[in-house]
Image: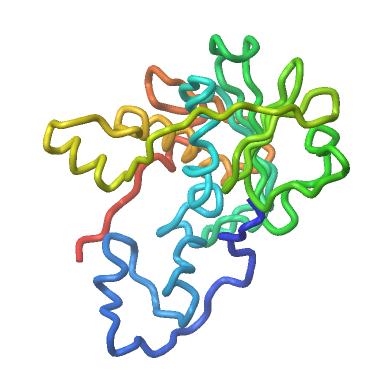
């Protein structure tokens, strides 16, 4: 994703006048107190700040990871390593390359390498990302690198199969439209199941957030123990919880 929900700028100094229509203490919630700075947190930019958001990976990962994660029947990764700038203690990095190593499934090799790119200009040019006719990559999306071809998955379009450098026709099945708001209500009423139940969404979110933790340890491989829900690295475990302010 070329989105930039990161902040590499200077640490905030001083304070600005809190708008009359904003309850700053309530907005901070359980996060630690700090002075209000105009446009640094609200509106929207909270995604960039450690105490409030998860950067571009947390913002867009839940959307872009979803289809590959489902199709390959993945669980949580064994290792995570991020290439990014040094942590500042305030904002998420503006550019990240996160490499996951997942256990193999019936749809992958013995292990699966998954690389996430975000920030302006992402991803960098790579032979595996070259499209037929030097076509430009979609603004956001994913691409499967297989043994016999590649599958391009644009974020807002149909997937495209690439074999021997050319697009191959794909027959798409007709699917009934689904409304996730209605799915949720129907599931609450016991009428049906959602397409993304908590049992699935929790694992997907776990995988993404492990990458968010890894950007606090650039160029260091973190090892995740699925059985204990802990890292082998004690300093990374310190980031799995927080001290919540009473307000």
Identify whether 153 is placed above or below 227. below
Residue at position x 74%, y 27% from top? 168
Residue at position x 63%, y 35% from top? 159
Identify whether 63 is placed above or below 144. below
In screen coordinates, is 194 left or right of 123?
A: left
Q: Number of labelled discs?
A: 0
Identify whether 63 is placed above or below 151. below
Query: Percent from the top left, x then y, of residue 206?
Result: 42, 34
Residue at position x 58%, y 26% from top? 79
Structure colour scheme: rainbow
In screen coordinates, is 216 left or right of 162?
A: left
Query: Percent from the top left, x then y, of residue 116?
Result: 64, 40
- Quadrant where the C terminus sits is bottom left
In screen coordinates, is 78 left or right of 194?
A: right
Query: Percent from the top left, x then y, of residue 244?
Result: 27, 54
In the depicted view, which residue is nearer to us: 32 or 18? 18
In the depicted view, which residue is nearer to us: 129 or 214? 129
Query: Percent from the top left, x then y, of residue 149?
Result: 75, 22
Residue at position x 25%, y 30% from top? 193
Identify whether 230 is placed above or below 119. above
Furthest residue to the left? 189
- Image quarter for residue 34? bottom left
In the depicted view, which residue is nearer to us: 67 or 42? 67
């Amino acid at each position: 994703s070329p989105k930039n929900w990161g902040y590499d700028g200077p640490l905030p100094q001083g304070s600005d006048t809190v708008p009359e229509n904003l309850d700053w203490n309530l907005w901070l919630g359980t996060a630690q107190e700090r002075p209000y700075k105009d446009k640094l947190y609200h509106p929207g930019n909270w995604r960039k700040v450690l105490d409030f958001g998860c950067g571009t990976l947390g913002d867009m990962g839940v959307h872009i990871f979803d289809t590959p994660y489902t199709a390959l029947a993945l669980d949580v990764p064994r290792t995570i390593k991020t290439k990014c700038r040094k942590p500042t203690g305030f904002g998420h990095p503006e550019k990240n390359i996160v490499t996951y190593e997942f256990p193999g499934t019936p749809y992958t090799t013995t292990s699966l390498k998954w690389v996430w790119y975000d920030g302006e200009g992402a991803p960098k040019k790579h032979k595996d990302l070259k499209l037929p006719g030097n076509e430009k990559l979609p603004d956001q999306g994913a691409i499967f690198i297989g043994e016999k071809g590649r599958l391009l998955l644009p974020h807002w379009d149909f997937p495209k199969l690439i074999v021997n450098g050319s697009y191959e026709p794909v027959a798409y099945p007709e699917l009934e439209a689904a409304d996730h708001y209605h799915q949720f209500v129907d599931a609450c009423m016991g009428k049906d199941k959602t397409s993304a139940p908590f049992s699935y969404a929790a694992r997907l979110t776990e995988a993404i957030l492990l990458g968010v933790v890894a950007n606090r340890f650039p160029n260091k491989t973190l090892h995740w123990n699925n059985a204990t829900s802990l890292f082998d690295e004690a300093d990374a475990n310190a980031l799995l919880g927080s001290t919540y302010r009473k307000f």
